[in-house]
Each structure stands twice: as C-alpha cells, then as structure tokens.
Image (cartoon, rainbow, N blue to C red):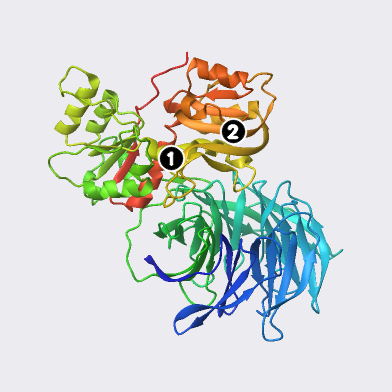
Amino acid sequence: MNIELVDTLKGHVGKVWNVKWNPFGTILSSCGEDKSIRLWGKQSHQWKLKTVLQDGHQKTIREVSWSPCSKYLASASFDATTAIWDNISGQFECNATIEGHENEVKSVSWSQSGKFIATCSRDKSVWIWESENDEYECSAVLNAHTQDVKKVIWHPYLDMVVSASYDNTIKMFTEDQADNEWTNISTLKSHESTVWSLSFDKDGKRLVSCSDDQTLKIWKEYLPGNAEGVGTDSDYPTWKCVCTLAGYHFGPIYDVTWCHLTSMIATACADNNIRIFKEAEDSDPNQPMFELVCSKYHAHEQDVNSVAWHPTEHGLLASGSDDSFVKLWKINTKCFLTKTKPYIFTTKNILTTIAELQFKMSGEQKAVNTFKGLKLSKMVEILEQFADPSLAEKWDNVGLLLEPTTSTLITNIMLTNDLTETVLEEAVEKKINLIVSYHPPIFVPLKRITQQSWKERIIAKCLENRIAVYSPHTSWDAVYGGVTDWLGDAFSSHLCDKLGKTPLIPNTNEEMDQRTGMGRLLYVNYISLNKCVELIKQHTGLSNVRIAFGKDKNQDSTVECIALVPGSGGSLLKGVRADLYVTGEMFHHDLLEANHNGVTVILTNHSDSERGFLKKMCRNLEKLLEGAANVSVSQVDKDPITTI
C-alpha cells in the first residue's frame, strides 16, 4: 500500500487550515489565513478552482462545514463569527452571520439531521445553534471545558456533539428530551496534552482522537447492560479508551479522519507527514490493534493541518498545510508494503516488535538475518533526511565518521549519547554494525590510532569489528522535532498556543524549515518555578535537578517565557530575555550573570538534557526503515556525573 500524489491545488496565500468535501464529493472546500474559502471541482480528471468566497470574515477562517443537503456551508473565523453561505441562487453567497462567541471561533460542524450547528471557541465554550428557515438561534451555551475548545463534531446519525479541548479532555453533549436542555453526558480523559481533533467510525460506535501528545486514541462505546461488564452511568453509554497508538508521529497531530468507506484512519501532523492506519484483521474489539499501513513523508513543506477522506471514492484523501497548498492523494491498496509491528499500548498489554521479543525471550543476541538490511550509504541518506548536516554548527564534526573497508548491509543499529568503551563493548556483544553517537567520538583531530588513549582504542576497535559510526550532534539540536524540541516537550501541555515555541536563533537558510534553529523560546501559561522543576524531572526521568533562583525569585514565582538549550547552553543563552533558562550545564559566572538579571536557571547535567531524545529517535528510525534493520538504544550509556 502506498500514497500517490494526484494533484496540488494552489491559490491560497498563507496557511490552509481546513479542507472539507461536500456530502456528494463533487466539491472540495478549503479555507485559511487569507480569509477566503476556495471551492474546487473536477474537470477532465483534474481539480480546478470554481469559486472564491470572500468578504464574509475579517480574519483567518479556521474551519468550514457542509450541511447534509450540500446547499449550505458554514465557516468559523478568528473574527469571533460564524458565516453561513448558500447557493440557492446558483452561486454561493453569505446570507447570515452568527455572533455570540467572545473570542476566535476554532471549529464549526453541521449535524447530520441538518437541524443543528455546533461552534466552539477560545472563550472555552461550545454553542449549539438551531437552524430553521434560514434563521439561526442559539439553543445552548455549554461551558464545560476549562480551556480553549479546539474542535466540535457531530455523531454520524445522532444529535450528539463531541468537543476536544486544550484542557486535554473530550466531552460529549446531548439534548435531554425531558427538558430540552443540553447536557454533558461524558468526559473522556486519557490524553496528556491538547486534543486537536476527533472522528467517528461509520457506525458511530467508536471514536478516534489525536493530540499534541503525539498519540492517537481509540474510544469504544459501551451501552448500559453491556456483555463486557463495563460500568455505565444512568441511561447513557460509557466511552472507554481501548487503544493508544504512540511512537508513530514526530510532532503534534493536528487532525484525524476515519474513512467510512475503507475504515482507514488518516492523520495530519506537524512533522509535515501524512500517515494511514488500519485495524488488524484479527483485532479484538475490546483491545483493538491498528497498524501503520503507509506513510507519506514530507507530504507538505510545513505542518499538515487538515485531512479529509472523499465520501464516495475509495482511497482519495485531501490535505491542507501551512505551506499554502491543498493536495489530493490516492491510497493505492494494490501495492504491497512490508509493515513493521506497531507500538500499541492497550488497556491491558503492551505489544513490542518481534525483534524485541526474540531478544527478551532468548536472553541472547538477536538473529540479524531477521532484517533485510540497508546499504550504509542509504542509511546515511535516511539519517540526513531527518536532519540535514548543514544545520549543524560550523565548529561541529557531524556525519559519517567511520566507514569500514568491507561493505556490509546495515541490519543492527544502536543509538547512544556518548560512544564510550563500555558502550562499544555492548555494541560488539550485540553485533551492532552501525553506531549513531549523538556526540562525535572524533572531534579533535587524531594524529595516531594506538592503544594509548580511550578514544584511539574506540576507533581501532570499531574498525576491527567493522562497525560504522555516524554522529549528528548539533544538527539534531537544530532540526524541528529534534533534541531541543524533545526537551521543550516537558512544557507542551502548558504552551500558550500553537505558536508558543520558536527557535532562539533561527536558521537563516530560507530553503530550510523555518522552525529549525538553535535553542527554543517557549511561551507558557504562567506556571510556577516549582511546577517547572516537576515537569523537567518527570520528562527526563531524573530524580534531581539543580536550580539557581533569579534575583528576588523563589519556587512560587511564575514563569511566562522559557529559553532552553540542551547540553551546554551558556553561550547561546547569554543575554536572552526570559524568566527561566533550562540547559544541561553552565559556567559559574554565566549563572551569576543570569541570576542577577532576574533569570532562574535549571541544570540537568549535560547529557541528561539530551539522552531522553534517543528513545524517541529510535521509534522514528523504526518507522523510517520499515523493518529493514533493528534499532535499539544503548543500555549502558549514562551521564558521567552521579548525584550521591
């Protein structure tokens, strides 16, 4: 199975926030930062621009929604209004503007019955509007969420609305027939960060959600008196998380859509990629297994914000991105793709890859012939697709550092923060043939390779055992989704909004992703220094960190701006205006300077601010390699400093 590009639709200026097909699949609508809605139709096997709807909003249009009859289109805008467009006269015109929200309207959705419209906003509320004879009256204002509400959708055949929020929860609402009051009947909690989007399966019995925590979650409905014995409250069903898909995405997942024709799930991610998942044939309904069946890496040049399945044509998918393009994709199910076993976390078990199970069960070295292998040159190409070496600092030594004279296929890869003699012994024992060492083992030029120094012994032993060595170092620091962003993920649930994280020193190459660069500035929602310490310890797995309080600051002082640099951040952080610096280590006098300027500093130890990224990168590589090689993280690599 693969994803083929069918067409690229150009015309928007700025971000494309949302794409939606009309119910018959004859029109594709897109909206975005340029305050316009574009309607696309098919002509002679190509999709062409039919109409541009303008002057309905004063600011960005965040989302559009079609009525079930396809004659009406609703649009939600950052100008705090929702516009209703109709084509009763033969062309679309704005015939109504709905007002009431106090802030940006983030989402709009038309119920399947056509009777209701739901909207949600940054003002933390969900509004239900009743539609009758082209008149729209507010039926309910629902203030159940505690933070921005990002998404609203309707059940595929019931008048039940579901909302997703920055408060990490999903809520379900329905109208009580006894008193016609809308009621919050269920709150779904499992995500660890903002829930961006939702989608029902065709029967409305299951729901998929996506989040800033880089996971998908599958929720299943359990009716009162269900055979499984799942408890329910009153006459309403219980929705239970039965599956979590983690480790596939390298950034926040902004949209998800469940195809009602093929049952495939498509995701839109901040890592610029589109992924397709499908439930395994032998899946247990109460503990379902979903497989990643295909991915389109670099589907767009920037964040993918929206994906939408065609309602009548199998495998046709539309996407919209920050890069201003709308793209159409065809999922070709006839092509065969060898799939890796997914990392799936269910309520009762954790499934690992076959290779990992072999290692754990035998207690001995994995059989490397389980993997078909890749040429070293191809492996380097894949690593450099993730992080271009040009992103590294000029003083750094990155790339392929050691290449054995005998060409062998790379089947066994190990990631480590530092290539020490202990780590190398582990690699030799496990028959590793490529070590990816974050820090370069060759930095200062070597005049000889003898047994006199530990670094020389490492080089000699690698060559003797035909082990290649690649080092990414500061290219992984700078790349979007790399080490620095991983460290910043400690605060992901507290970022102000999608724009709450920017490079401290942006990359100046205009052809590169503008989210790359050294260090990060994070803008958070006023959290205490004590909370910052807790978040860092939890994220890095450390039991202790060091903190130097800024002048007149204490553990209860609040933080709004955080500057962070993994490793040794003193030189990059010097003079940066922020409430808090987070790094691995700093010189004594740099610490004093920061503290006297009112800046608090948290230090984790140099490599402890970097090492945790390796687990994430291990999962990244497993997906990129599609089963061609085994990838593991060193079990003996550790920071040389121990707190006693």
Q: Is residue 321 left or right of residue 196?
A: left
Q: Under tag 1, what secondary structure?
A: helix
Q: Is residue 152 visible?
A: yes
Residue 138 lies, in percent from the top left, at 82, 65
Q: Is residue 54 left or right of residue 251?
A: right
Look at label 1 and name its amino acid.
Ala
The residue at the point 52 percent across, 73 percent down is 310
Q: Residue 478 shows which numbered tag? A: 1
Q: Furthest-left residue in view?
A: 406
Look at label 2 and name its amino acid.
Ile
Q: Nearer the viewer, residue 33 or 104?
A: 33
* Depicted 24 relative to depicted 286: above or below: below
Q: Quadrant of the N terminus?
A: bottom left
Q: Residue 562 shows which numbered tag? A: 2
Q: Under tag 2, what secondary structure?
A: strand
Label 2: few (<14), some (14–19) or many (≥20) C-alpha neighbours in 10 Å: many
Residue 484 lies, in percent from the top left, at 47, 37
Q: Furthest-top residue in view?
A: 644
Q: Nearer the viewer, residue 573 or 77?
A: 573
Dot 2 or dot 1: first in sequence order is 1
Examine the image and state in which quarter residue 527 appears: top right
Residue 219 lies, in percent from the top left, at 59, 55
Residue 411 lies, in percent from the top left, at 24, 45
Examine the image and state in which quarter residue 387 appears: top left
Real-space Cα separation, disc 2 to disc 1, in angstroms: 17 Å
Q: Is residue 622 left or right of residue 129?
A: left
